[in-house]
Image (cartoon, rainbow, N blue to C red):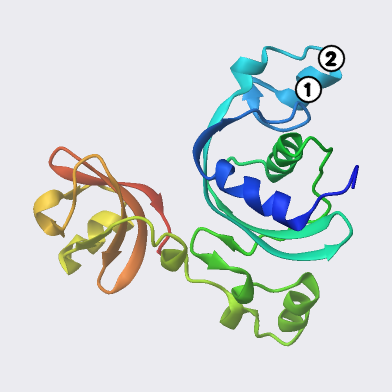
Amino acid sequence: QEGRVEEEALRSVLPDFLGEQWQIPPMYSAVKLDGNKLYQLARRGEEGELVSRKRRIVIEELELLEQTGENRFLLKIRCSKGTYVRVLCADIGERLSLPCHMSFLLRSRSGPFMLDGSLTLNEAGELIEAGEIERALTPMDQALCFLPEAVAEDSAMRFLRNGNPVPLERVSPCETGRLHRVYCGGIFAGIGIAKEDRLVMKTLLMHI
């Protein structure tokens, strides 16, 4: 039927969008081009070259979950940072020779953070009023779990408290040139980077 998206037709084109690819972000977005945000350029009528706006993205998973109505489908997408889902929907529509758009987006995961571990503003407000908000907070070091761990000897605490570099022989393990989650005396100290023979704290997060 003309103007209607069939489930099987949609399902058949989805595999074509998997993997690494180029995507052109919409002009009304915060992506920068030559130091200017695209939406600022758009408002000034300066569209810019499309090729200059291309970004490399990765679509790792693209699954049709269900049809929720006529010409309405629910998709599950696992993608890289910087992916514009509304552009992806428009590109899928172009492949089907029909106009398509995104009407609803729910982010179920961002890095290590899952939707089922989140709170609504109302729920957070209730916990604050009850004086129980701390039990819902994610520890800072857990939020930085993507960084490797480095443990400084207890004797290095005085260096950390004073904001001084820590000799690398007092830190293990530690890879030169990489950011690390730094612990000392069983306490999360913050984010540090190994430079030559010392560990330099970039961000001190411990209570001093």
| Residue type indicated by callout 2 | Arg
Q: Dot 2, crowdedness within 10 Å: few (<14), some or many (≥20)?
A: few
Residue 44 in view: yes
Q: Locate residue 50: give its quadrant.
A: top right
Residue at 19% of width from left, 60% of height from top?
156
144, 154: nearer the viewer: 144
Tag 1 secondary structure: helix
* Element type at mark 2: loop
Left or right: where 150 falls relative to 59? left
- Image quadrant holding the C terminus, namely bottom left
CA separation in Å, label 1 and label 2:
6 Å
Q: Is residue 207 visible?
A: no
| Residue identified by numbered label 1 | 40
Residue 44 numbered tag: 2
Residue 131: percent from left, percent from top? 68, 85
What's the residue type where badge 1 is placed?
Gln
Callout 1 touching callout 2 (CB < 8 Å): yes
Q: Which mark is residue 201?
A: none
* Left or right: 62, with 201 as reference point: right
Q: At 86% across and 54% down in the image, what residue appears?
A: 71
In the foreground, 165 or 181:
181
Q: Residue at x 19, y 47 (%)?
A: 175
